[in-house]
Image (spheres, rainbow, N blue to C red):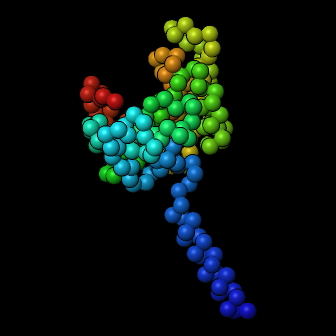
Amino acid sequence: MNLTRNILLVGCLLMRVTTMHAAAPDKMVLGVELGARFLVPTCSAGEISFSSRLCFNGALINHKAWGADEYYVSLPSAGTPPYVRGELRVSVVNGIVESVQIGTWGIQAQGGALAALTKQYGEPTRARKQMQNALRSRFPTRFAEWDLRDFSVKFDGTTGSIDWGRIEVTTHRYRKLVKDYEQRSPADSSR
């Protein structure tokens, strides 16, 4: 009886250890894990536009004033959701992924993007619709935010144009880093 109990106890402990290292599904953003080491390889010459794997453009790395390196990550053409437009912008601090920005196809894709985000993160903490009269749109733009334990998600159905939108998944640590930098030097803050 003691042997059986000990085996079960060891089995439970091993299961706990192995699952602790698995990524929480909500921290995976199109194959990039928020809060983990940035391990995406550099793209080869022909892969930047049409890739069969995640890779980043080694010639396009922005070094931000607040200490982040911003990588442009190409997505594999197969399996990328239809609302995604272009590559991911991944912000990395000290080798750790702190923020992932995803461009979207704006107003025409906002329904699909919002549905996918709601499926992944649950109902938004805040959501609103707003007519964008300056954009001459007949449909309201949708905005939503999720406040989660280690990070937040922000969805803008449109950003300055009806055919561009944005999803931003950011750690609280990174949001604070950017905010602190902007408060120290408001005239110098370039995003």
Q: Position of residue 28 (x, y in %)?
A: 52, 48
Q: Nearer the viewer, residue 162 or 55?
A: 55
Q: Residue at x 39, y 34 (%)?
A: 49
Look at the picture and state if 85 lies above or below 46: above
Q: Is residue 68 above or below residue 140?
A: below
Residue 144 at what x, y percent from top left?
Answer: 59, 30
Q: In the rendered image, which quarter contains the C terminus?
A: top left
In this view, which residue lies farthest toward the front?
A: 46
Residue 119 pos. (x, y %): 66, 41
Q: Which of these two is toward me, 95 or 71? A: 71
Identify the residue at horizontal 48%, vertical 16% (top origin): 161
**Viewer can see residue 176:** no
Question: Can residue 81 be seen from the camera position used here?
Answer: yes
Residue at the spot 56% in from the left edge and 41% down from the top edge: 79
Q: Residue at x 63, y 75 (%)?
A: 12
Left or right, 111 with respect to 157, comes to right
Residue 25 image position (x, y, % from top left) = 58, 51
Placement of the N terminus among the 4 image quadrants: bottom right
**Left or right relative to 110: residue 31:** left
Q: Quadrant of residue 155?
A: top right
Number of numbered discs visible in the structure rendering: 0
Residue 47 sits in quarter: top left
Farthest-out residue, right: 1
Q: Is residue 134 above or below residue 73?
A: above
Task: Please tell me which residue lies in front, 77 or 125.
Answer: 77
